[in-house]
Amino acid sequence: MLASLTIQNIVLIEKLTVRFAAGLCGLTGETGAGKSILLDSLGLSLGARADAGLVRKGAEQAQVIAEFEITNDHRSGAILKEAGLLASEDGTLILRRTLGADGRSKAYINDQPVSAGLLRNVGDTLVEIHGQFDTQGLLNPATHRAMLDDYAGLDMAALAGAWKNWQAHKTALEEMRAGATQAREDEDYLRQALEDLDALEPKAGEESELDSLRTRLMNREQVIESLNEAYAALNGDNDPVRSAWGALDRVAAKLGDDTQMNDAISALDRASAETQEALSLIQSLSSDLSESEHDLESIDDRLYALRGQARKHDCAVDDLAAMRDRLAARLDLIEHGDEALAAQEAKAAKAREDYIKAARAAHETRIKAGARLDKLVGAELPPLKLDKARFETQSEEMDEGEWSAAGFSRVRFAVATNPGADPGALNKIASGGEMARFMLALKVVMATAGGPDTLVFDEVDAGVGGAVAAAVGERLHRLTRDDTGNPSRQVMVVTHSPQVAARSDAQWIVRKDQQGENVLTDIVSLQDMDARREEIARMLSGAQVTQEARAAAGKLLEDSSKDKAA
């Protein structure tokens, strides 16, 4: 949840840092004091569109830093990991946005530069903002199905897997059909090409072998001449090794058993043996070259044929054997294609049936969850001065062309604010204040369905007062609590209602201060009950705070404390 927000040079704010905690956080202040600046600043840090008009007059750059405390398994972690960013080890996530007077902005996550789009994706997992002019969430039908699925606890893994399997088999079938059609059109060409390759019988590595043999044959005459010369030199009558050996052998007996003489004769024996081996190798190599069954013309013809086929099929010579197998497979598809197509059609049909079964189960779950949701939301509406309104979850099957991994359900939240009227889109039926209260009712019912830990409601109490405002405050407070009554979520509410402000666990006042010729906006935490009572009294009576207003404010705070304890 949001731990702190630092704002610098945004409109009327020079520099300030606000620290928040879990529970219901009330933001109050006179109209025009700058509460919207706070929300604009928060939105900027979450990736909202940058507007140069937010930069304070005379400043070159504005900056907003939002610090969040998150758990190790928070949804933002997966987004950061996919983007190759490191998450903080201490559970802190810092979003920072700078905005120049020229409208250019830069975004950072944990001081690592990111795109505004990535900042927005991460921000969506951290904060959910609902206001009179909100265009996301409840007002965006594209989000309704996912919201209902969260509420229903629907496991989408099996459905997504069935969709993926069907699409894979469907694609394979389409490719097989296209391949069979193309193969039939190319049958004559394929048969001739296969016949040519079968006649050629190309082998992998053959081109290299032929090139090497060709090089040897091109130099054969010169090589044979040199081999003969070497053979004659080693096998002539004037062999120095044999002459030296004979000379030493004649006098060896005269020296007796002389070690040096014996070693010299042994060395000459070895040299003679090595000479005989060299003669044998030279003779063999000369014979191979002289009697070779290959000739340059046949090798050149073979290389020409191989390289011609390689150019024809646009592949390497070494790939011709594999090309031959592919051509044979295409011809086989013509000859036995009906059986293969029938088998693939059966697989695709079975995969489609499995998907429809899973999508049908999800659709029925959505219908049941929608009926339950309608009933519970309907019970929340009368206390919110929406007693004549009706909330309706509409789930209908889409045409096959619109099916997806999420199934074939089209889900829409619709409302009717007058009896007998047909339910319609919320943004076309309800007023700004009604929309915010519908959202509140829905979030209260769906509190356990997940989503961001920080919710922001702007002017949710617009146009209501008294018991209705008290009901709004009670629901906002309830939205922050878990089953044990402890704060598990953070709800920030911008309010003009004293009943809502009294329900807050903590309260801040947004106010304007005249500093010389400048007017600056400041946000002050109301740390004690006296300060809160004075602010709520102002909200009750206006600029002139009376004792009666202070007494009424004290009563609101006292009653709120009792209700919280209960």
Image: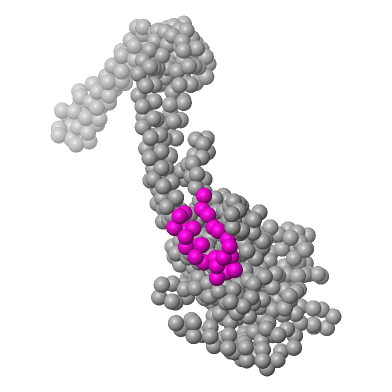
Return the residue nearer the eye: 356 or 528: 356
Q: How many marks?
A: 0
**Which part of the image, by quadrant, shows the C terminus?**
bottom left
Q: Measured along the vertical axis of the image, is residue 96 above or below residue 164?
A: below
| In this rendering, position of residue 61 left or right of residue 231 | right
Query: Can the viewer see residue 140?
Result: no
* Residue appearing at x 70%, y 70% in the figure: 37
Residue 71, quarter of picture:
bottom left
Residue 428 in picture, x, y percent from top left: 66, 54
Residue 418, quarter of picture:
bottom right
* Residue appearing at x 81%, y 69% in the figure: 57
Q: Measured along the vertical axis of the image, is residue 480 above or below residue 147?
A: below
Residue 243 in picture, x, y percent from top left: 28, 20
Return the residue nearer the eye: 318 or 508: 508
Return the residue nearer the eye: 474 or 238: 474
Q: Residue furthest right?
A: 517
Residue 366 in picture, x, y percent from top left: 44, 50
Q: Please, which colouring scheme is shown? A: one colour
| In this rendering, position of residue 518 left or right of residue 258 | right
Residue 495 in picture, x, y percent from top left: 64, 74
| In this rendering, position of residue 524 left or right of residue 89 | right
Q: Measured along the vertical axis of the image, is residue 334 above or below residue 449?
A: above
Q: Residue furthest bottom?
A: 547
As for residue 423 lying within the magenta part, the answer is: no
| In this rendering, position of residue 561 left or right of residue 360 | right
Query: Can the viewer see residue 185?
Result: yes
* Residue appearing at x 67%, y 61% in the figure: 431
Image: magenta residue range? 370-394
* Residue appearing at x 64%, y 59% in the figure: 430
As for residue 371 lying within the magenta part, the answer is: yes
